[in-house]
Amino acid sequence: MIPLMYGLIVASILFVIGLLGVMIRRNLYFLLLSLVIMNNGAITALFVASSYWQQSDGEVLAILAVTTVLAQIVVGLTLLVKLIYRRKNFNIDSLSEMKG
Amino acid sequence: MIVVFYIASIIAVVASIIVIFCRRVEKAILYLAISLFASALIFILLKTYISAVLYILFFICGVILLFLAVSILLKIHKDSVETNKHGISPKIWLGPLVLAFILLVILIYGVVGTDYSQFKQSHELMHQMSIYAYVLMIELAVFLLLGAAVIAYYFIHRMFSEK
Amino acid sequence: MNLLYLTIIVPLLSFLILVCFGRQMRSINVMLIGICTIFVIGLITMFSCVDFITNTVPDMTLVYTRNLWTWFSVGDLEVPFSLTLDGLSLTFLVLISFFGLLIYFFAACYLKSKEDIYNFYAYSNLLITSMLTVVLVDNLFVMLLGWEGVSISTYLLIGIYYKQARNSYAAVKAFVMMHLTDIFLIIGIFLLYQTLETLKISTMLIKAQNDLAIDSDIIFWITIMLFLGAMSKSALFPMHTWFTETTLAPMPAVALLQSSTVILAGVYLVLRLSNLFMMSSDTLYIMLLFASLTVIFASSIALVQNDIKRIVTYINLTQISYLFYAFSTQNWSLSLNCLINYSVTSTLLILATAILVKQCRGERDISKLGGLLKSTPILYIIFLIIMLSLSAFPLISSSFYIKGDIILGLMSQGNLLVGTISLLGILLSSLSIWRLIFSVFHHKPNKKNQFVKIKKINYLPIFILLIFTTALFIYYPVPTQGILPIATLDTQGQLPFRLLLGAVTLLSLVIAYIFYAYPNSEVHEILNTPMVKSLVKLCKTNWRFDFVLNNVFVKPYIYLANWLKKDPFAIWDNWVMWGIKKINSYIVSLENGQIRWYLVSMVIGSIIILMLLIFI
């Protein structure tokens, strides 16, 4: 049996790696990839917790999260296509028009 | 069994790191797939088989297919933003790295420092969710996905019609 | 005596009537109102005197008190407005009403312009009101009311010829000087209240004698503060400037200010609180010091001035300091006599000068006058008698006895230096009056003077006053037993000292004759030596006192004001503004539209929140 602690550690490592990716990449495509990794970490945490308590609630929640991530990626990729047609590049910072 | 967990988690972490730092699109998608499969292996080790299968079929396939489709559609092969020769410049990643490290340390500290026995005791008190709740959840998820698909179609359709 | 409150109400009403309607009245009506006012006061004073004398029991102090109303009461502090009449205030009441009557009468004959008459009577009424308030009330706080009234009316009287900017400035200067020094009086009153917890003068004096130690610190500070306050009204040396500014007022106003009212305020305060002052020998010594300074200062300046009004003013200033000599010898009843003598002499001097100036069509420079002996013999005689009084001429003048006693008191206390200075003062002031007489009446005029005919009625107040300067009136029967401590004068050595004083007087006659009567070449030679010249120059510029005053007080004040005009204490205010702007621009620059930066800030925030969750 894998201890809860280890699973949570792996989940948080994955989450932080995804976060780092979001922070350092400017390419919207890679940004979406990093988002997937981040969400993967969260889903992992859910799975680990549900198996720890031997309850299927966590798994259901995890499947819901998976669906959410998919929806998010669909919308994100749509936005990526739109960005390419508007700006002809992938740089998310080219959208930074709202300055203080 | 714990050894398998270690290996799987190491593969997942390393593959993720490669994903966020690499600049070629195909490579990134490949490593993402590896990372996701490694986490699926962890799920199997956790004895949540049905969910793991759902995860592989639904999530990994969906994500990889979507990304691949977009990259082929838009003919993306390389990261055209980060033009630096040796990958992303340290000027950009150093600060976020430090911050992410601090966050990681705190998270792990929080995870390690928690006393798990009290969670174990309290779990009998939890009420049992009814089956209808699960059905409702699934319906919600499907609606969400449907909404996302509609949005995607609408956006792309409008854009093409503009052109 | 029940009508005593009328002495304050009547001049106040008269002042209000004149101020409100005076411009529409004919000047004869204004005069009538003014003189009636002072006449009513005089009548009440006479009644009070009669009452007082008939009710007096030997060896008893008669004190008449009448509560009018309570001004205010805060907690334990209650300030009643009550009038008190005892021997001392009766004396002052008589003095003020008598001289007021004379001067009002003189002004009626003297002033011609409608504007001047209206102004003079209106403001003098205010002055008399406030003086009587000072004299009659029994509470230091209420006395302050009259005290400030005196300041204001001094300002108004000096500024009668307000159309010249110089006069207005002089009035402002006098007002500012008086008010600045009033602060000392207020501090003194507060100190008294703090230590004795009463403001009523009679209880205060009893309490002070019971509770406070002689020559203790607190009594020194109280008395020095009160003395500084009194000094400003009595025009001792550093605060004499308002006194010299009074020369810009019309002559009757000068007489009123210099001789019979404002000076009396300070003197009254010292006399009323004489029990307090006796308890602090240091204060009396400081008094002596200031008086000596004033004597030297004023008499030396009087010697070289050319403006006749200024000469008279400085001579009067010299005479005032003898009052304070009398205080410091603790011979209070003698000082009261000296005060009466001073009032008589100075009023006489000013009125005589007024007639002289008027006769010469407003010519005030004595070097341009001369040879008036033939045209105005009466005035000549008057001036001679004044001179006798000022120079303390033996046997004839009363001031010989009074000043002799004062100086003898000083000498017997061991203050030989101060005694010498006071003798010098007598010498110098008699010299200056001689100089005035010689150059006005004897010397040949540079140009032919035009004379104005003076009516005989103008001389009436002067002739009344002339009687009082003679030796017939030396010691007045002043009913002050029980109020002023009685001092026994050491009569030992009185005779030789009087001989000495007589010798000084004769010496002044001789010197004056040599210097001023027929100045020969040797005298001119002495006058032309560099030292004498520089001395004369110094004296002509009032010892450069105005210069010093300007540099020590006015310039730093203006500098400070200019500095404060820039609001230096509000600079931190600008710092706050600057800081807010800086922070604002910094925060605005944070919102740069870069998703990466937003995420970093989110991470920082989440780190902080996690830390709070975990570590706290």
Image: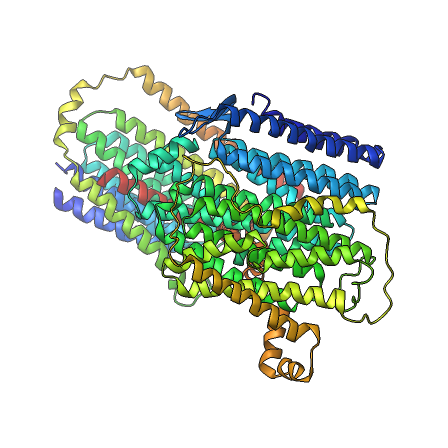
The quarter of the image holding the N terminus of chain C is top right
- Above/below status of C195 relative to C251: above
For this view, does C163 lie left or right of residue C234? right
Image coordinates for residue C155, horizontal then vertical, percent: 66, 46
Q: Which quadrant of the figure has residue C26? A: top right
Q: Quadrant of the C terminus of chain C?
A: top left
Kindly tell me whether residue C233 is visible in this rendering. Answer: yes
Colour setup of the view: rainbow
* Viewer-nearest residue: C154 or A82: C154
Residue C79 position, x and y percent, is 47, 27
Q: Which residue sits at x=44%, y=54%?
A: C287
Q: Which corner quadrant of the image does residue C9 belong to? A: top right
In the displayed structure, would residue C616 be above or below residue C364? above
In the rendered image, the vertical position of residue C161 relative to residue B124, given as above or below: below
Q: Residue at x 72, y 40 (%)?
A: C104
- Depth check: give the residue in front, C442 or C190: C442
x and y, in percent, of residue A77 in the image: 48, 43
Residue C588 visible at all? no
Q: For this rendering, which residue is in front, A6 or C186?
A: C186
Counting labels gives 0
Of C488 and C327, nearer the camera is C488
Please state the horizontal and vertical placement of residue B50, each as a whole percent of the image.
26, 29
